[in-house]
Image (cartoon, grey):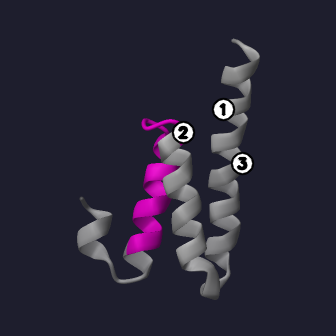
Amino acid sequence: MTIQAQILKLLKELQTELGMALLKRKDSRGEAIEQFKHAIQLKGDFAPAHTNLGNALRAGGEVARATS
């Protein structure tokens, strides 16, 4: 694995973890959603980011967006 690939892997994982930490704070759901979206932009098939994004949207009452 190249250095670039390793950095991308770590970055998407870190952004997902940051999103999870932000999601625990009730007032930071929007920021958490942005972190999950950014992780997905880095690697579109990163399942944890998709799952967490859906959960964050659903928690905010955005069920239609969470299931699309």
- The quadrant in which residue 10 appears is top right
Q: Residue at x 66, y 32 (%)?
A: 8
Q: Estimate the x, y position of residue 13 in percent, counting from the top left.
A: 66, 43
Q: Residue 28's x, y, as percent?
A: 62, 80
Type of the residue with mark 1: Leu
The prevailing secondary structure element of the residues shown in magenta is helix
Q: Is residue 1 magenta?
A: no
The disc at residue 42 is 2
Residue numbers of the magenta segment: 42-57
Look at discs 3 and 2 and give the one toward the viewer: 2
| Element class at badge 3 | helix
List the residue tagged with mark 1. 8
Query: Do tag 1 and tag 2 residues touch (Cβ < 8 Å)?
Result: yes
- Mark 1 or mark 3, which has the lower sequence index? 1
Question: Which residue is found at the position 70% from the left and 68% from the top?
Answer: 21
Q: 7 above or below 39?
A: above
Residue 25, given in percent of the width and then of the height, sits at 67, 82
The image shows residue 27, relative to residue 10, as above or below, that is below
Residue at the (72%, 24%) spot, across then down: 6
Q: Is residue 45 magenta?
A: yes
Q: Could you classify mark 3 by the number of other residues whose Cα lies within 10 Å: few (under 14), some (14-19), or many (20 or more)?
A: some
Three-letter code, disc 2: Leu
Q: Earlier in the sequence, mark 1 or mark 2?
A: 1
Q: Judge left or right: residue 62 versus residue 28.
A: left
Quadrant the N terminus occupies: top right
Q: Which mark is residue 14?
A: 3
As helix, strand or loop, the secondary structure at mark 2 comes to: helix
* Above or below: residue 10 compared with residue 17: above
